[in-house]
Structures are given as structure tokens and as C-alpha cells.
Amino acid sequence: MDGNQTWPPPTPSPPPFSSRPRASPSPATHRRRRRHSKKHKPRPAPAPTPQGADFSALPPDLVHRALAAACASDVAAASRACRAWWDALRPLREAAALHAYGRRVKHDPVTGARAVPAAAASRGGGERVETERQRALGLFRRAARLGSAAAMVDAGLMCWEDGRREEAVGYYRSAADLGHPIGMCNLGVSYLEADPPKAEEAIRWFYPSASAGNARAQYNLGLCLQNGKGVKRNQKEAAKWYLRAAEGGNVRAMYNISLCYSYGEGLAQDPVRAKRWLQLAADCGHKKALYECGIKLCAAGDKVKCLMYLELATRRGEAAAAHMRDVILESLSVVNAQLAMSDADKWKPRTLHPRPRR
């Protein structure tokens, strides 16, 4: 035996990429495959995609108007789209800065007082606050002239508070024409409070504002639908808008939707949801909700908490709560009465964060 020979002899390895030979299919198999195979239609050619939108080709006036109702951050972001937009939106950026400073002056007179002359700062506190308030109005007017819809709304609010309602309505109309939801809502409210009321005009502005997610417009629209003001009475539609407004944080809508669930008006009767919305409205400080929660607590035997709710409702101007509060107060001991009043002094209304619109 050869010394180099191994035992047993190695098995020869198969050649690489070897495969079994396929038998050619018969004509009958071809026919069977054609009969059962799916017919694939040719896919249409995709539409040509533009290489990029030419933002600079848009007219500057159109860009300015399209973003007049946008917030300051959106205006700043749009300004970076191209050089043409940067130039077109320069007035809105300046308006946003003036509007922001005007709000600081209006809501924080101490901060605004730093910029007033020393002679004005030495006057009385109320006079200084009024000076700062008028300065804030001047800033809002400047921002409004530059095209800011939010500044138009704030200028309108201050004119309305000062009794200059025609001027306020003019600012509201300008903001509403630019699509600002609060401007549309405030214009609708001003039509409702006109002499005589113009309910149909109010409805015309409430609908787009409510559709944009403004909770106050949703509540007012529901109220008009419930009472048939400017529109045909529709309790089901009213309940729908009340619910949207309540979910958006409107306290009056919370109370109204609790009534809808309680009495089955526009919605299926649901005592559990009615109680939940009533409690939430009371927690947010609605005076009628506080009074009704106090009555329910009295019926449940919790007179200390009942007295707290009735006291809170009385402080908010609910006339029916005062008599009931005095009756409960006489039936409690001095210690329990003091406890209820102490709880009322410490109580603070709940602050809600509206659910974001999807």
C-alpha cells in the first residue's frame, strides 16, 4: 500500500453550482399555467415630479396676506424659505415684535413703566397704568397697520373696553377677513350685541371660527342653534358644538353639555357623563355648576363640602346660593362652619389645557 494513500478513499465533492436538469413541460402544462395565471396590467408611468417649487415666483402681496394671521414663529420660519419671502415678510416680522412688546406693556405695567419718563413714573399708580395701557394700544395699532391680524384683535379688544365699539368692529373685521379665528369670533359676538342684533351675520362668522377650533365660537354657535338665533333651531347640532367647545376648555359649554347629557337633549341621556361635566365646570369656577354641586352634596349628607361650594357660588354672584348657604351655615357647628369657610378661602379654580385639535 502506498504510504501517501488514505483509507477509505475520499468521496469526490460535487461540482459547484450543480442543479438537477429540469424536464421540459408538456404543452398541456403550458395551457394549464396560462389558464390559472393572473394577468398583470402594465403599471402606468409615474407622473413627472417637479424638481422644486419656485417660492420666489409668488407675488409678495399674496405671501404677506397668506401669513398675516400666522403666529410669529410661523412667520419667522416662512421667512427663511427664500430671499423673496424674507423681503415680503419683513413688515410682519416687525409687526410681531411690536405686538409682543405691546402685550408685555399691557399685561405687565411694571415692566412697561421702565420705558416711561420720570415725570410719568412719579404720578399715581392708576394713572401710570392707564398711560402704559394707552402705550400698548399704540403699539397694537402700529402692528395692525403693518398687517398683523393678532394685533388687530388686541387693538379691537382695547377699543371695545374703552367704549369705541365702531373702531373695535373695524379691527375685528380686518382680522376676520385675514382668516384669524379670534377675529371672526369677536366680529360675530359684536354682531350679536349690536342694536338691533344681527344674528344671521354673527352665524356667518361663527361657523368658520368654530371650524378652525375656536372654543368660544363653538359655544356661541351652539347657543344660537339651541335658541334658533339667526339659524333654524337644531338641538342635536347645538349639543355637538357644545361638546367640542367643552373639550376645548370653554367652561360655559361644560355646564351646557352636562345639561344635555342630564336631560337627553341632542344627545343620549347619560347621568354619568352629566355628573362628570358638571363637576368639571364647578372645578373651573362656573357659578351655577358650583351651586348645583353644593345641592347634590347636601342631599348626599356632606354639609361641610356643600357649604364650601355654596359659599363659592355666592361669591361669584349666584343669587340662589346665598339663601341655601345661610340655611346650611345655621345647621353646622362653629368648627365645621369655619372649616368650610377656610376651604373656600383656599380654593382655586382648575386651570385646563385645551386638547390640541387634530
Image (spheres, rainbow, N blue to C red):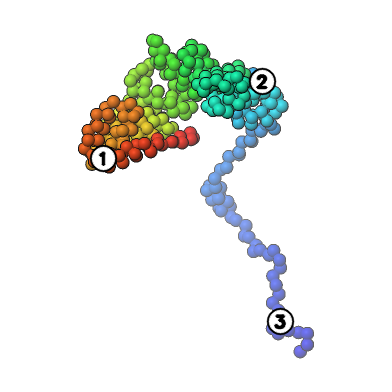
Q: Residue 334 got which mark? A: 1
- Badge nearest the viewer, 3 or 2: 2
Q: Residue furthest top?
A: 196
Disc 2 is placed on an element classified as helix
The picture places residue 185, in percent across and down from the top left corner, at 46, 21
Left or right of 316 in this view: 190: right
Taking depth in this image into account, of 42 and 142 the one nearest to the observer is 142
Give the residue type at disc 1.
Answer: Val
Position above or below: 300 against 68: below
- Badge nearest the viewer, 2 or 1: 1
Position above or below: 268 against 57: below
Q: Earlier in the sequence, mark 1 or mark 3?
A: 3
- Residue 137 seen anywhere in this rendered image of the structure: no
Residue hosting label 3: 9
Q: Earlier in the sequence, mark 2 or mark 1?
A: 2
Residue hosting label 2: 60
Left or right of 178 in this view: 5: right
Q: Earlier in the sequence, mark 3 or mark 2?
A: 3
Taking depth in this image into account, of 274 and 153 the one nearest to the observer is 153
Mark 3 and mark 2: Cα distance apart in space: 90 Å
Instruction: Name the residue at 70% across, 23% down.
Output: 87
Q: Quadrant of residue 45?
A: top right
Left or right of 129 in this view: 319: left
The picture places residue 4, in percent across and down from the top left corner, at 78, 85
Are the residues tagged 1 and 3 within 8 Å (C-beta)? no
Mark 2 and mark 1: Cα distance apart in space: 72 Å
